[in-house]
Amino acid sequence: MTLGNSMLIPVLPAIETALGITPLQASLIITVYSVMAIILIPIAGYLSDRIGRKKVIIPSLILAGAGGAVCGWAGSLQPGGYGIILAGRVLQGIGAAGAMPIVLPLVGDMFRSEQQVSAGLGLIETSNTFGKVLSPILGSALALLAWQAPFWSVPILCALSIILVLFLVKVPPKQGEEAAAPPPPGKFLSGVWNLYRSKAGWLTALFVVGCFSMFILFGLLFYLSETLEKSHHMKGILKGLVLAIPLAVLCAASYAAGKWIGEHKKVMKWTVTGGFLLCAASIAACLFWEATSIRIALLSGAGLGIGAGLPCLDAFITEGIDKEERGTISSLYSSMRFIGVAAGPPVASQLMKQSAPLLLGVMASVAAAAFILALAGIRPRNDKG
């Protein structure tokens, strides 16, 4: 699901040229996908709590694949295909809402030990970020065939995912209270609202920090993609490899953090706060060095900070909520992350019209705000509580 979105970032300049659209219009190809996910993820989470995770994931993958096929077909309708591409991305976003976000509570369902859940979530975030690492390389390579090729890869990736989920994911049967019939929608939503109110402090902090992390990541990726192509005339696989450098650091950090944090809630808190402090400092340092190579190194430091924090945020959400509400609460968290994904590219495109330092200053400020929120809002009472 990460490939289905991030793979398009290095291709956006080519899409602009082929369709005769502006950078802002091109960024909307990322944004409309994310907006649909934002709206529908909570509904998908509720359905997954009621009817089961796999019964939501499989149809959602089918929809996502169909959306990719619509976009690929629309690409042949130049120059009038832009609107249909947006429609296809809407369909793909509907599918995305019921796929990747439901994986987080599914991991929580499959393991009993908090340490196993943390390690599992670390692997999920690593897979997610590995998708981001692979995205610019694969997107650039496919674009050498045709700029529409990344869209056509989505149905293939979704078909592969459907086969893997159908045959390899074994969900343990519910026992005891878990096996009871789910409550009706009104009672369920009332329970979720009461749960949120009782945990509003740390849940709100996690939701906003998750949103800020994706806003920073996708905003900076958009900035780097546009800079490499338009200022340094870097295209194709070479551009993809350069874009992958900070993402590879982010991926490695997610894997290491997931293996390291275990059940230790205080360690998770300081990993998140330290990660966003490093992120803010690294982005701010870009204001003092204009050389692209140095900025890539500094943005890799920002990726290290974000990557270390993501599995900790997932673990707080998944381990801090009972299974009955886990799908809905984790889906709300995923929606907040998609808000960041949706806002990052268009905001970056508008800020870049003014100046690159303004963009970097805003991103550093957002990272600093995430640090303060995590420091003040996440207050674990003990290592296992």
Image (cartoon, rainbow, N blue to C red):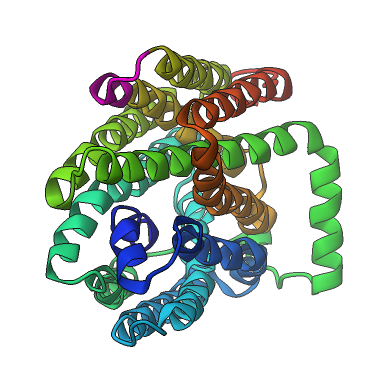
Q: Is residue 277 visible?
A: yes
Instruction: Give the answer, above or below, for where 280 lies relative to 21.
Output: above
In the picture, measured across the screen, residue 338 lies left or right of residue 154, that is: right
In the picture, measured across the screen, residue 373 lies left or right of residue 7, that is: right
Residue range highlighted in magenta? 289-297
Residue depicted at 71% across the width and 38% down the height: 203
Instruction: Give the answer, above or below, for where 107 lies relative to 267.
Output: below
| Residue 369 drawn at (x, y percent) | 65, 24
Instruction: Give the answer, above or below, for where 109 lies relative to 302.
Output: below
Q: Nearer the viewer, residue 157 or 118?
A: 157
Q: How many tags in the picture?
A: 0
Quarter holding residue 154: bottom left
Q: Quadrant of the C terminus?
A: top right
Residue depicted at 58% across the width and 17% down the height: 266
| Residue 150 drawn at (x, y percent) | 26, 68
Q: Nearer the viewer, residue 8 or 324?
A: 8
Q: Is residue 169 visible?
A: no
In the picture, measured across the screen, residue 177 lies left or right of residue 185, that is: left
| Residue 286 drawn at (x, y percent) | 41, 19
Tell me which secondary structure the magenta stretch mostly adopts: helix
Q: Quadrant of the N terminus?
A: bottom left
Residue depicted at 12% across the width and 70% down the height: 145
